[in-house]
Image (cartoon, rainbow, N blue to C red):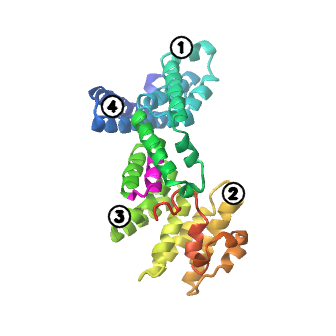
Amino acid sequence: MSARSTVPEAYTRTLGVSAQHKVRALSLLAEGGEEATRTAVTLLHEAWRAERRALRVLEAPSPETRLRAAVEACGCLVDARDPSLVLDPAWGEVLDASTAVSPAAAASIRRRLDPKVNALIREYSEAADRAPELFRLLADEAAWRTPHAVRETARRQAEQMVQTFPGDPRAWRSLSFTWWLTNRPQDAWRTIRRAREIDPDDNVAAGAEVNLARVVLPPEEARAFITAAASAAMHGALDLHLGLPLLGALMAYAEGAVDASGWWERTYDLASLCLTLPALHDDERKRFRLAQLIARERLAGRKPTIDLLFRVGLGAAVPHIPPSEREDVVRAFRSLDRRAWWGDAAA
């Protein structure tokens, strides 16, 4: 790194924020208790993000500086007991940065981190082995059809995972999913909000939050939540996991609304933006195109029909859509997304 006089002030300031978060978090962890732990792991994730931001401020950090930054950032997640983000991306960033320095230098910089990471990964592997129903359910696109007893078992296993790894936002997201699958939408909402608190950048959780908001919040509050989420997505991070739930929610509110044109305009704009997302699979592009055409038809004063599915190349899906949903293209659109939160588990 450059001489101290040339270190950007933003770098020093951001590292100071990280240091403050870490000191406070470690104090809270020593204190113990559910609330203290909750605050501590949130602060440690803030510190992790601050460490990564600080590195980006530097114009040309040395390989050693880059490795130390990766080690500090990964260490925050280890202290937070978050194996998911250690596995992806933090530990990989440490390994990648290590290739640019000598083996001796890497070993010296990583000497305290390596045994902690190895222990955490080993503990996580053992915990996953004790939760086979949970991990099978998470990989099952038709999870809502799984026998109720299996879903309950998966939920108990998910609860154990968050008790063991209270700083793992993906574990909290998994617990929320199992609450949803066992017909406890309020608990699903509470736990998805916890996942979002720890990792606000997780769009899978953000998409689940959108779906749950329509179920658990009072109608006006839910509409305001969806409107705000759509606006934020239009001006920030957006991907498949957030785009599809938002489009489904916007269209559901548009149907029959007094101010329907405003909802359809939002739907059209969001679908158009989703179509510009990089590396879309062909099926995803077709679904975004379908949403765009549905909105265009409504804005033109026409009722969209099932023919739109054939026009965008989704005709093969029509026989698999329940007959009761074929006359309602918005419901048909939702039927196309059966990954997780669109399922009928809570019905």
The secondary structure that dominates the magenta segment is: helix
The earlier-in-sequence mark between 2 and 4 is 4
Q: Quadrant of residue 8?
A: top left
**Few, some or many residues within 10 Å of mark 1 (<14, 14–19, 20+):** few
Mark 2 lies on a secondary structure that is: loop
**Few, some or many residues within 10 Å of mark 2 (<14, 14–19, 20+):** few
The earlier-in-sequence mark between 1 and 3 is 1
Q: Which tag is nearer the camera, tag 4 or tag 1?
A: 4
Residue 28 x %, y %? 29, 30
**Type of amino acid under label 4:** Ala
**Where 135 sits versus 98, above or below?**
below
The reply to whether residue 165 is visible in this rendering is yes
In this figure, which residue is indicated by the disc labeled 2?
281
Q: Which mark is residue 136?
A: none
Mark 3 lies on a secondary structure that is: loop
In this figure, which residue is indicated by the disc labeled 3?
217
Q: CA distance from mark 4 to mark 3?
A: 32 Å
In this figure, which residue is indicated by the disc labeled 1?
108
**Where 166 sits versus 312, above or below?**
above
Q: Which residues are magenta?
A: 173-185
Residue 140 x %, y %? 60, 51
Q: Which one is in front, 101 or 195?
A: 195
Q: Residue furthest bottom?
A: 301
Q: CA distance from mark 2 to mark 4?
A: 41 Å
**Type of amino acid under label 3:** Leu
Q: Quadrant of residue 335?
A: bottom right
Specify whether 185 is left or right of 279.
Answer: left
Q: CA distance from mark 2 to mark 3?
A: 33 Å
**Where 73 sits versus 338, above or below?**
above
